[in-house]
Image: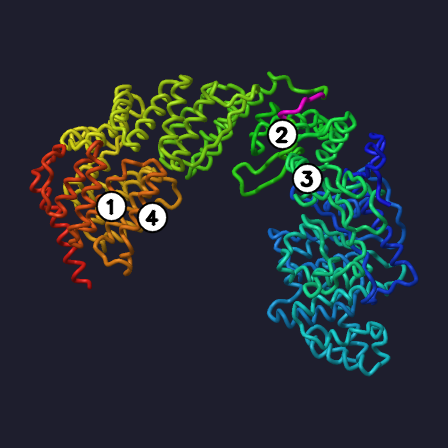
Amino acid sequence: MAGRDFRTMFGSNDHRVGSDEAFTNREGQWRVFVSALDGHLRHVAGQGFDAADLEAPRRNLLVLHGIGGIGKSTLSRRLEAALSNAEHRPAQWGEPPWRGPRIVPVRVDLAHSANIDFERVVLTIRLAVAAAVGRPMPAFDIALRRYWDRTYPNQSLDEYLRRDGLMARFGQALPSQMQAALGEVAQGLALPGMLGSAVGQLTGALVRALREHRRSVRALAGCALLADVLEGDTDLEALSYYPHLLAWELARLPAGKRITPVVLLDTFEDVGDRTQRDKERLLQRLVWLMPNAFFVVTGRNRLQWADPALHGQLDWTGPVAWPGLADHGLPAPRTAEAYPDGARQILVGDFSDEDREDYLTRRLTIDGRPLIDPTLRRLIAARSHGLPLHLDLAVMRFLELRRAGVTPQPADLDVDFPALIVRTFADLTSDERNVLRGVSLLDAFDVTLATASSGTDRDGPVLRLLERPLVTHTPIGLWPYHLHALIRSTLRTAEDTTDDRWSPRDWRNAAERAHVALGRQWAEHDGPGRRVLIACLRQGLALAAEFHLDLRWLTEAAWQYVSDSVWEPLAVPLRDADGETRPRTPADALAELLSTLGRRQHEHRSNTADRLAAVLDTRLLPEELEHMALYYLAKVHRDLGDSAASRTAMQQVADGGGRRAPAARRGLAHLARLAGDFPAALSVARTLGWEGRQNRVLGDIHWPHGDITGAADHYERARNDAEQRGIAGERATSQAHRALALAFADPTTADGDIALAHELLADLTLHASSLTVHIAVLIRDAGRSTGVDRGTDIDGRARALRTELESAGLASIGPLLELAVCFHHAVRGDEENLAAAVGRLRRLTDESDQAYLGDIACFMGDLPVPPDGRAVRWLESEETVRRRWRTLVLRRTAGDRGSR
């Protein structure tokens, strides 16, 4: 009978409420294992047991499953150690009750990283038996030797065992035992000279002798299937049936030599998945065909072998074949006494999503119906992060409210429980508790960060804590360790009633230490990429914002973040004890500033402008970071088409003389160009140097004059400068502009530059530069017939790009798109559509900037420039610029005609 939850039973006068117990620890799992193994030993010792029985239900299996990081592998290793030597058995586990054959543990890690195939599983078991028994297993050994010699004719089994390290683990008993088995059979068949060198002939002679029932092979005649096995194929499928021979040999050992192998198969989830069961099928045969061995499977998932729906995927399925796996009651890591007799499917630690819902559905019932409604069940399940204790405490909280006559609401159960802290700390030393509190400040950590945040001067407590199942390990992460999400949340938010609890000052000091350690890791990192920068910024900003720390290294890291123009998302939530979300400290303001800059590639520029203005209004940032915010606000104003506001902000940043002053002067050059004052733009551009991106600015000045070669050269130099300095964003932007310029001159040449621009932008989030490349593609395809090759509907593609520009708030790019459409119609000689496109372009620029693009469109179509338009100050005569653009159109027209 399943265990009952007496707290629930005695916590309410409503005796209709049904309940189930639902928590345990490692001692309970040991008791489950001891009970299961003791039952197996008694079953094997019974008179009705036959190791060769191929039909009887199997109870030689225990499954311990649970979510990753809950400690299943640790449990598997500890079981192996406890069975190998009683001295390694934890004192609280107690003395096991079994007597009889010696227990021989064999642990096999099936993780992908261990690279264990089915052959090695079989060899590992045989090697363990060889070391424990010290005598041959003729039926199995002859079949295995035949398999090996045929499968690997150029590599002896002895050589493989030595090279793979298995001999070092189990000793060298197997090769000599296998040779002895072959010699014994050869001598019985009067073939003394036919030992290992002629295994095929030996097995052929043995099969004939078995078929003829000769007395010389009487010892092996009891193995009814041996002759058939030796006559069969020697592939992996055949090998998976050989364990039957080993089980038969183990069963006929003399009483003094008998053993019980306990095979621990760990990380079973890596065997396959719910659709790919080839390796699982082989391992199931191993378990089924060795009924006198006991198997302990640990993995993330339940074994589904008792499910009849798997018939055809596995050899033996259904509750009759595997009665211990068919328990579909409440899924919970319960004590040994709480499991029904014969239950062999045990949940360890945290629940999966499905099991959480199942738990809460079955945990409290009235007349067989769930007492907790679905909305509350979903909230509790999500809040628990799968931790069984949280689910248990939430259920008790539900009953407490119900007992008080209150109908539980979501807010009543969206809470942390201080009892979690007490239970978590129960078996930790004082140093380990400090480490645990320290790392709860961090999303992820390594040993160095954990040691620093805890305030200890030793790594020992950290290393001990890392062995606990409440810490998960992700080897591929920058910081490989993570604290269980619910435990972390509870440590940070629930009331701590322990004697050695931290004061607010203690927490702030720990945050300060962690913050300094993060800054040191960023400063000392000299490898490529921005991974360390982004990770340190995210954690450092969160700590500084929550605990009101000084910016320190964050200022320099913020400048590094913006310098590459890559814009990875930096969503750092503002946390405050009062629930306030607006910036209240410099760290809050910096977090909001960098988060806004990262988001601006994904939202309308007007939203970005509002956020940047709000950051500046707080006046929390130091002057140099205020200039950063003001500079990017100026850029956003320019993108939105508000040149006056942009010019005012750019001038303020340039006059400030800070780090963004060169970029602000570049912005002023852009604004002069956009206003059509090219001499002024050129005058500023010549003073910019690399920091002001001089070459890119010069390219932007030259291509409107039709000087495509000059512009392309400047863009190429800008790209190369950025590449030499490792500035990925500037490199991609310069290449995007180069592709745009070259697209006007030669579609064939532009192909390569457009492809390179796409490649450089692939891993970046630069919306404006990406749209520039899309416009370059339109220009490259200009004049081509609709629907043919790349000449799909230019007007249709332009409409799609207009929509994208509008949704992003990139009004400043709109006129460039319209110029591309004008170029298309000019090349095709479509005067009507060209006039309409020029009119649309003029309407965009008459009241704003880039009016010179309307003049260029007229040059393309050899049209007069309207006299009422705004005057453009070109670097050369208007006639020279007109001639260049008209020549580009005529060359494209001639080229398109020639290619038809």
Q: Which residue is mark 2?
A: 489
- Mark 2 or mark 3, whichever is nearer to me: 3
* Magenta segment: 492-497
Q: Amino acid at mark 3?
A: Pro
Can you give x and y, in whole percent of width and height, for residue 214 in the image?
A: 84, 81
- From mark 4 to mark 2, how far is it between C-alphas? 42 Å
Tag 3–tag 4 contact (CB < 8 Å): no
Mark 2, other Cα within 10 Å: few <14 / some 14–19 / many ≥20:
some
Q: Which residue is mark 1?
A: 740
Is residue 651 rendered to the left or right of residue 221? left
Tag 2–tag 3 contact (CB < 8 Å): no
Q: Nearer the viewer, residue 285 or 602?
A: 602
Q: Earlier in the sequence, mark 1 or mark 2?
A: 2
Q: Amino acid at mark 2?
A: Ser
Q: Secondary structure at mark 2?
A: helix
Identify whether 247 is placed above or below 869. below
